[in-house]
Amino acid sequence: MIYDLVIIGAGPAGLTAGIYARTKMMSTLILDAGVVGGQLVNLYPEKGIHNFPGFETIQARKLSDKLYAQAESMECEIHEMEKVIDLKQTGQNITVKTNKTEYVTKSVIISIGMGMFKPRRIGCKGETEFEGKGLSYIMPLKEDIVGKKIVVFGGGNSAIEMAMIAGKVADTTIVHRRTEFRANESNVSKLKNSRVKTIMETELQSVNGTDHITSVTLKQGNENIEIPTDLVVISIGISANLDDLKGWDIELTESGLIKVGPDMSTSRRGVYACGDVVDYPGKCKQIITGCGEAGTAVLSAHKFVKKPYWA
Ligand code: NAP
């Protein structure tokens, strides 16, 4: 069988691409090296999403479940735990080589997000020692933090949203190194009206304890202060792991992301991309924009594969 489209990555952008492709009746295979859902399930499954149209609030995991169900109902073929290793040109078609087998397709959409991403580390004393023993990079389950003291580090949307979730059941403090937050104004405003305590212009010096965390040492100007805590969450962004892309004969930016045109085409014929893995002037990393780019990528792939009279 020759597919019309193989989509690599089953996060919100990849699943949206699948849904759109099926409205064009393109035979569509979606492959993911892990499980369906991307960052929605791997990074912040418990978090409420407040800015996805159609839902006042929806838990990240539930949004992933809904996108998955919609893609399946539209008859997308979806394979989890299947990692793409290479994209080989086979005449006019592309052979997608995975760790399990090979598929021939007329077009490809790459939507691998940040790849098999890793949380960014802060690099302080005690960070490695206490990882998994009270220090984490994602929000611990609510039931594990009830009544505890927790300190969250970071100034972006993720850190603030995690701190506000924790603040409902735990004594929570957020620490940021600047005078103001980077996060959306609406999140900052909600934080100010929440029970979460805020410490600004302060950096993490060390995580302290014996077999478990007892305190953190913070640097404020020239002074060091120690505050007691049971748990530490570091949320200072994620580092992409996109090394796989280097061998796929696609032009990348200096930061290793995929360069795309306004129609989401890459430098390789028949290969399109969308979501966090792409970069272009004005790029905005939001779920909604990744999904929008997915629609554009599919329409471009459809024109390339089906060559409709109006295109
Ligand atoms: P982010 O926006 O990149 O923010 C990372 C934060 O960590 C920044 O405030 C940064 O400080 C701080 N930081 C970085 N390195 C640090 C260090 N060594 N020590 C102390 N602080 C450090 O990351 P994110 O919050 O994970 O979000 C990633 C992307 O997803 C963003 O584009 C974000 O808007 C988006 N997102 C959106 C939503 C939403 O719309 N609701 C929710 C989650 C994520 P500086 O500010 O000083 O650089």
Image (tube, rainbow, N blue to C red):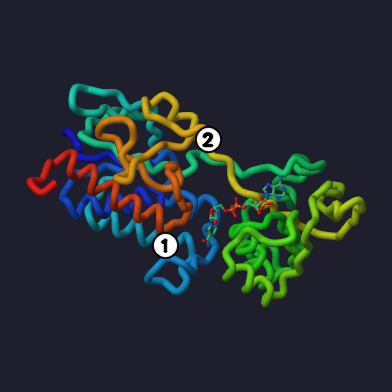
Q: Estimate the x, y position of residue 275 in percent, counting from the top left.
A: 41, 48
Q: Identify the residue position indicated by label 1 in the image.
A: 63
The relative height of residue 142 versus residue 104 in the rendered view (above or below) is below
- Residue 303, percent across and down? 17, 43
Residue at the location (52% across, 66% down)? 48
At horizontal 46% and vertical 56% (from top left) the residue drawn is 286
- Considering every residue shown, the one lying at the far bottom of the view is 193
Q: How far across and how far down the image is residue 285, in percent?
A: 48, 52
Q: Is residue 56 left or right of residue 75?
A: right
Between marks 1 and 2, how big is the CA–CA gap?
29 Å
Q: Is residue 31 visible?
A: no
Please tell me which residue lies in front, 28 or 277: 277
Quarter occupied by residue 178: bottom right
Residue 140: mark: none
| Residue furthest to the left | 309
Q: How many marks?
A: 2
| Residue 107 drawn at (x, y percent) | 24, 36
Report the residue at 75% width, 66% height from top: 198
Residue 259 position (above or below residue 68): above
Q: Residue at x 44, y 42 (%)?
A: 279
Label 1 with label 2: CB-CB less than 8 Å = no
Q: Amino acid at mark 2?
A: Ser
- Please determine whether, in this image, residue 141 is positioned above or below residue 259: below
Residue 113 visible within the image? yes
The label on residue 255 is 2
